[in-house]
Image (spheres, rainbow, N blue to C red):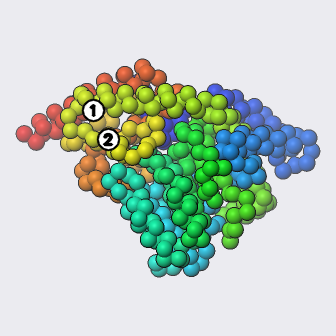
Amino acid sequence: SAYLDYNATAPIRPEALAAVVDALQVVGNASSVHHPGRDAAYRVEVARRHLADLLNCSPGEIIFTSGATEANNLALRAAHRRGARIVTGSAEHPAVLETSRDLAQNEPGSLTVLPMRADGLVETVALEEELGRGDVGLVSLMAANNETGVLTDLTPVVKAAHAAGALVHTDATQMIGRLTLDLSEVDVDLLSLSAHKFGGPQGVGALFVRRGTPLPFRPLITGGGQEKGWRAGTLNVPGIAGAGAAAAAVSRDLADDVARVTQLRDQLEHMVTTAVDGCRINGQQAPRLPGVASITFAGAPADAVMAAMPRIAASDGSACASGAPTPSHVLLAMGLSREEAECTVRFSLGYATTADEIAVAAEAVVRAVHQVRAAMAATAG
Ligand code: PMP
């Protein structure tokens, strides 16, 4: 069997599992001043340091959340000013798109969703035009797309946005842990991440807020004022400790993993596309994450292909919109037809993927696509 669904969630790293179990045994509440409380707070601060080291930012710039969905909500809702426009992209995750739509609901014209090019990149000319209108308060563009792996070149986006007086948020959920993102070089104001995409536990993430960022901020969750008032509630100490341990493991292993995972992904794409006619790799013309292969198999519906290879864990559409019958909005935004989008399987590899898994998967995929096409031809005839 092969697990090729890292973009949905990655297997937990042994270091992270150990840190979770260890922190579960701490008695204190991280907000208490006695020794057991300080012990819990210590785990949190160690984790914050590991995450800050991975991102090359300062620990004080990190707010722990329940995941990237919450971090995206917090970022957009904190940065949105009445009367200022939000500019985002049509291939964003629903946690950004739906939140932006919600914020703009009562203010007609206050949201612009930029079109995507066929290669999966945002049309930069369109972004510059929007910024030129002078009323943009926030630009939110993802660092890496969850379905295609296509990377946004954030540096020119930040430059243009800042020149126009707008803040920049990036949903870096799929980038962190897969490629280096150095916050001393990439000058975004806000960044969201999620631990379970890089081997930490599910249900924990973080929002980076650059020091000095002027935000008309209101917390989503009010109460005891934890996380400097950004996010009230007793901290998820085991989850946070696991996230920190996973971040430390990423810092140690990333350079090797990038090279290895890129090679495995390229191998998978090569084996599949040489053995199967009529397939196309989405996002291949643009810079991409190392571990993502989004492949459209003409005439072979992805749900049938998946059913024909039960031991291969991949994704038809996106697990983020679990079970949703609608075709991927990302692929449609890139100009694929509805049918093409429905015939697309996403394979996503990561730190623990092996060459054996790739060999097993390639063989299974080729067999499954041929089987589905033969069945379709039989029913058509
Ligand atoms: N943004 C992107 C790009 C994602 O891929 C995901 C996970 N599907 C999320 C946000 C949501 O993250 P979480 O699961 O931590 O809420």
Circle count: 2
In the image, is residue 266 above or below residue 45?
above
Tell me residue 212's x, y (percent): 73, 63
The answer to whether the residue labelled 2 contacts the one labelled 1, judged by CB atoms less than 8 Å apart, is yes
Which residue lies at the image location 43% right of the left edge and 61% below the top edge? 124
Q: Mark 1 points at which residue?
A: 273
Label 2 element class: strand
Q: How far apart are marks 2 and 1 (CA)?
A: 9 Å
Quadrant of the snapshot with the N terminus: top left
Tell me residue 33's x, y (percent): 91, 48
Q: Quadrant of residue 163?
A: bottom right
Viewer-side residue, 225 vs 45: 45
Label 1 element class: helix
Viewer-side residue, 165 vs 291: 165
Quadrant of the snapshot with the C terminus: top left
In the image, is residue 119 above or below residue 252?
below
Which residue lies at the image location 84% right of the left edge and 50% below the top edge? 31
| The CB of the residue at mark 1 lies under 8 Å from ligand 1 | no
Q: Name the residue under label 2.
A: 281
Which residue lies at the image location 56% right of the left edge and 60% below the top edge? 158
Question: From where the camera sits, is residue 31 visible?
Answer: yes
Instruction: Single out the residue that lies furthest toward the top.
Output: 356
Residue kind at label 2, given as amino acid type: Ile
Viewer-side residue, 26 vs 231: 231
